[in-house]
Amino acid sequence: MPILVAAFCVVGTLFVQAGAEAQQPYRRNDPRRDRERKVDRGHISGRIIAVAPLDVGGAQRKTRVKSSDKSAGSEGPSRWMITVQPSKGRQISVTADGSSEIRIMRTELAGAGAMRFVQAGVEVEVEWSEITDPQTGGNAGLRADRMSVRAEEIEGTVDSIDKRRIVAKATPKVDKAPEGLEQPKVQVQGRGDARKGRSRRSANAGAVKPLTVRMAPVDGATRYTLDGTESTAADVLAAWKRKKALEFEAVVVSGGGNPVVEFHARSETTKKDGNFEGGAASKKSGR
């Protein structure tokens, strides 16, 4: 009999403890649960379809401000909502702020200077991470950890230039092979004598035809050089007006009206002498 009473007391104690645990309120923001929650991360490549500044509280401003406009403050907006549309799938919106790493490909430009070229229509690659709400532990949106704006290096001759745009005949820039390294010879094998049927056209079969490109300088952001010397847009415009002929190398952002990041102009005399050292990619490696 004493054994049955003891067993009943033990079982009763277990039921009481279980009932007490069931009555404890659920802690939505349990610190242990927050630590165990995995923050989502991802990568997206696409085209920017909207850029809007954010207020301190996170709400979008009613008046949309361009990234190059400083009227919103002495240093401009500090937070932006950027919406990207990939080639496939749904669009996503990410928040960029002072801690986001922003850079222009093929250049040294980064940070606030690179943000000047983050515009609608521009092609980008974004590495994002999920923002965790400190109160609830839930998802509070996406943040751009790293944003790379796509850009191309081109070269050619200027057809016309003014304060708002540059029209040129251009081709993709091809880096020269290092000295002492010969380009491999192309060997074509076929039936009959290979010397027959040759023409000048076949020798230039791989040449790229120049295309008309329209570029847009960005006030206070586009970098200019003239014959290897740091210059201004006015200097380059004056040089073109003197001869109506100007050769150049440039770094141009892909899309968005082709904003110009770097524009290195040169005269024909400088090119023949081989003294030009202001190329967009000549001083950069590994880009």
Image (tube, rainbow, N blue to C red):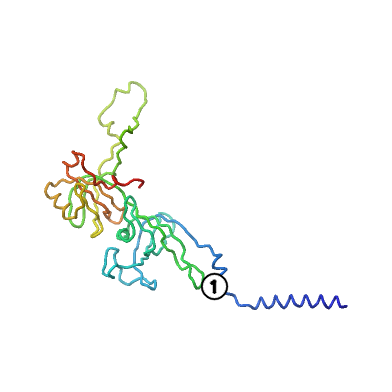
According to the picture, the residue beneath numbered tag 1 turns out to be 29
- Asked if residue 128 is positioned above or below residue 194 in the image, the reply reads below
Up-down relation of residue 5 to residue 67 (above or below):
below
Q: Is residue 37 left or right of residue 20?
A: left
Residue 118 rendering spot, x and y as whole percentages: 32, 59
Instruction: Give percent across and percent down for residue 107.
Output: 31, 51
The image shows residue 237 at horizontal and vertical percentages of 16, 53
Q: In which quadrant of the rendered view does residue 184 lie?
A: top left
- Residue at left offset 43%, top offset 60%: 128
Rendered residue at 55%/70% (across/down): 31
Q: Quadrant of the N terminus?
A: bottom right
Q: Nearer the viewer, residue 98 or 132?
A: 98
Q: Is residue 224 above or below residue 274?
A: below
Task: Name the amino acid type tagged 1.
Answer: Asn
Q: Horizontally, is 43 left or right of 275 in the view?
A: right
Q: Nearer the viewer, residue 180 or 129?
A: 180
Q: Callout 1: few (<14), some (14-19), or many (20+) C-alpha neighbours within 10 Å? A: some
Total labels drawn: 1
